[in-house]
Amino acid sequence: MSEAVELDPVESKMWITVTINGSKDTYLVEQRLTLADFIRKQVGLPGTHLGCEHGSCGACTIIMGNRAVRSCLLLAVQADGESIETVESLAENGVLSPLQEAFHANHALQCGYCTSGFLMSLVARLREGPIESEAEAREALSGNICRCTGYTGMVAAVMSLSSANGQNGEGV
Ligand code: FES
Ligand code: FES
């Protein structure tokens, strides 16, 4: 948290400045508001989902400072000065990203509730380098839980990506 954070003595709220999907803005937030609820309710980006709300399922995964994090375990005030990416950042002008397209093509989702978390975990992982084997794909998926569609389609989706369309860490 930066020193610029100011405590409002009346409301017990704090001003934070966050860059979300490329847009930098300042928000007055409740000190105990979770980052997930901030993103969903205050910023109005409902693509980040809440499942367990205690760090187990990964449905709430976003990228903060280039790392995949569970937004249900963080407070909004901890995002002060940070740059955040949510699932809404992936598609451009209605065109799915290569990873999203791969999920679609490989039937990697059923109800889709878990999907945004999986996608953001994978985006962060792919920025570290290509996923070159099914074992690496399963490792990359292992921090998230899907209740209904299983993991075979997701592994196939990841393995279908090539360095030309998303495995180079750019534009996934
Ligand atoms: S809702 Fe955050 S890990 Fe499950
Ligand atoms: S697709 Fe339904 S929980 Fe994963």
Image: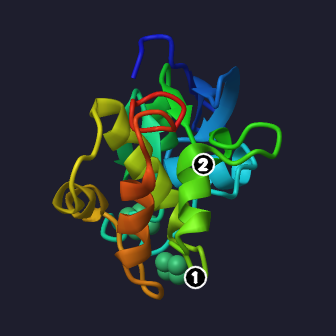
Answer yes or no: is residue 98 visible: yes
Residue type, numbered disc 2: Val
- Camera-nearest label, 1 or 2: 1
Q: Where is residue 156 in the image (x, y as percent from the top left)?
A: 39, 66
**What residue lies at 60% left-to-right and 24% top-to-bottom?**
19
Q: Quadrant of residue 157?
A: bottom left
**What residue lies at 43% left-to-right and 85% top-to-bottom?**
147
Any mark on residue 110, and which?
1
The reply, left or right, for residue 81 in relation to residue 91 is left
**What residue lies at 42% left-to-right and 42% top-to-bottom?**
162
Viewer-nearest residue: 54 or 57? 57
Q: Where is residue 14 in the image (x, y as percent from the top left)?
A: 57, 30
Ligand 2 near label 1 (Cβ, under 8 Å)? yes
Q: Where is 13 relative to 37, above or below?
A: above
Q: What element carries label 2?
A: helix
Which residue corresponds to mark 2?
Answer: 87
The reply, left or right, for residue 60 in relation to residue 152 is right
Answer yes or no: is residue 72 visible: no
Q: In which quarter of the image is residue 16?
A: top right
Q: What element carries label 1?
A: loop
Residue type, numbered disc 1: Gln
- Residues at discs 1 and 2 in contact (Cβ within 8 Å): no
Q: Position of residue 93 (x, y in %)?
A: 82, 38
Which part of the image, by quadrant, shows the N terminus?
top left
| Mark with earlier residue (1, 2) | 2
Quadrant of ligand 1 in image: bottom left
